[in-house]
């Protein structure tokens, strides 16, 4: 899988949040990661790019100022 989109909330501490949209060309998935690489994460499969982007937007939410990586 390759990363199509990646956002993070700008926090380098425990409150760090990352959201990834990945695809292998056919399958799409969104991962929400909390606490950096050693933290918790949740992965959701999506039927296509549009639904993956909608889910990524929902998981980011308005709480932080997200930065595209």
Image (spheres, grey):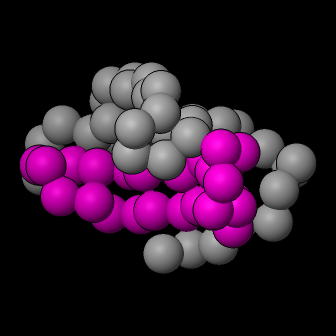
Can you tell which quarter of the image residue 28 is in? top left
Q: Is residue 41 left or right of residue 67?
A: left
**Residue plotted at (49% across, 47% down):** 36
Q: Is residue 28 left or right of residue 26?
A: right
**Residue plotted at (65% across, 72% down):** 67
**Residue plotted at (56% across, 40% down):** 35
The spot of residue 46 in percent (x, y) is 36, 29
The spot of residue 22 in percent (x, y) is 28, 50
* Relative to 37, residue 27 above or below: above
Residue, far right: 63
Q: Is residue 12 visible?
A: yes
Q: Of residues 44 and 10, which is closer to you in this image?
A: 10
Can you tell which quarter of the image residue 68 is in? bottom right
The spot of residue 40 in percent (x, y) is 47, 26
Can you tell which quarter of the image residue 56 is in? top right
What is the number of callouts on the image?
0
* Relative to 57, residue 51 above or below: above
Q: Of residues 40 and 4, which is closer to you in this image?
A: 40
**Residue plotted at (63% across, 62% down):** 12
Which region is colored magenta? Answer: 1-24
Q: Is residue 52 visible?
A: no
Q: Is residue 18 left or right of residue 9?
A: left
The spot of residue 27 in percent (x, y) is 18, 37
Q: Is residue 19 magenta?
A: yes
Q: Of residues 8 and 60, which is closer to you in this image?
A: 8
């Amino acid at each position: 899988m390759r990363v199509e989109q990646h956002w993070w909330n700008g926090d380098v501490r425990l409150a760090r949040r990352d959201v990834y949209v990945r695809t292998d060309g056919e399958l799409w998935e969104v991962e929400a990661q909390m606490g950096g690489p050693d933290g918790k994460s949740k992965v959701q499969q999506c039927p296509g790019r549009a639904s993956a982007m909608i889910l990524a937007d929902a998981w980011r939410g308005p709480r932080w100022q997200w930065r595209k990586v």
